[in-house]
Image (spheres, rainbow, N blue to C red):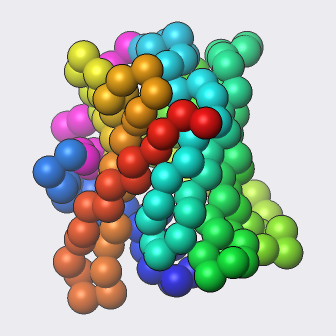
Amino acid sequence: MKKLLLLFLLTGLGLQGQNTLSFTEKTVSPKASISQIEWITGHWKGEAFGGTTEEIWSPPAAGVMMFVFRLIAKGEINFYEIGHIREVDNTLVFELKHFDKNLKGWEEKDEVQSFRLIKEDDNRLYFDGFTFEKVGPNEINIYGLIHQNDGSAEEIKFNYKRQ
């Protein structure tokens, strides 16, 4: 599972799924501010990867929204993520790090998974390989492009309900 999730986070350039986009050589991040994704603030639960997924997003402060994530499968914590969406150079960047159930980091000490903003539509923000979608006041979707060992890619939908 760890290897699959790392491949998920190391999305390739130029690939895309039905609901996700990826950077190409010509992609330029649009101007954006953290207020454009303030609607994700809150406590969210859903199901994915054979278990319960949970995300808690803070309100915006100082140009940043932070979050924590956990996956519970078969009655056990599988892994955690901690991260944020932050304003950088007049646009947004989605960044995160992974930790196992004992809080041992997956990435190297100074390594962070980073996904730049590609575009914004009415109810969606498209980052490189991730899309955040507001379905309604109490429901969101997060789409992620997962790359397989054979070179194929699969888009996974995380549907969350507000808690």
The percent coordinates of residue 88 (x first, y second) are 56, 24
Residue 130 percent coordinates (x, y): 37, 47
Side (left or right) of 117 relative to 106: left
- Residue 24 can be seen in this image: no
Left or right for 65, reference 126: right
Q: Is residue 30 magenta?
A: yes
How many marks are shown on the rendered structure?
0
Asked if residue 59 lies left or right of residue 101, the reply is left
Which is more toward the observer, 105 or 47? 47
> Is residue 87 visible in the rendered structure shown here?
yes
- Single out the residue that lies furthest toward the left: 18
Q: Position of residue 36 (x, y in %)?
A: 45, 14
The quarter holding residue 132 reads: top left
* Residue 53 x %, y %: 56, 58
The residue at 40%/53% (across/down) is 158
List the single residue furthest toward the bottom: 150
Q: Is residue 138 magenta?
A: no
Q: Quadrant of residue 163?
A: top right
- Relative to 116, say whether 11 is above or below: below
Which residues are the magenta region?
A: 20-31
Q: Is residue 17 left or right of residue 156?
A: left
Residue drawn at x 66%, y 17% is 60
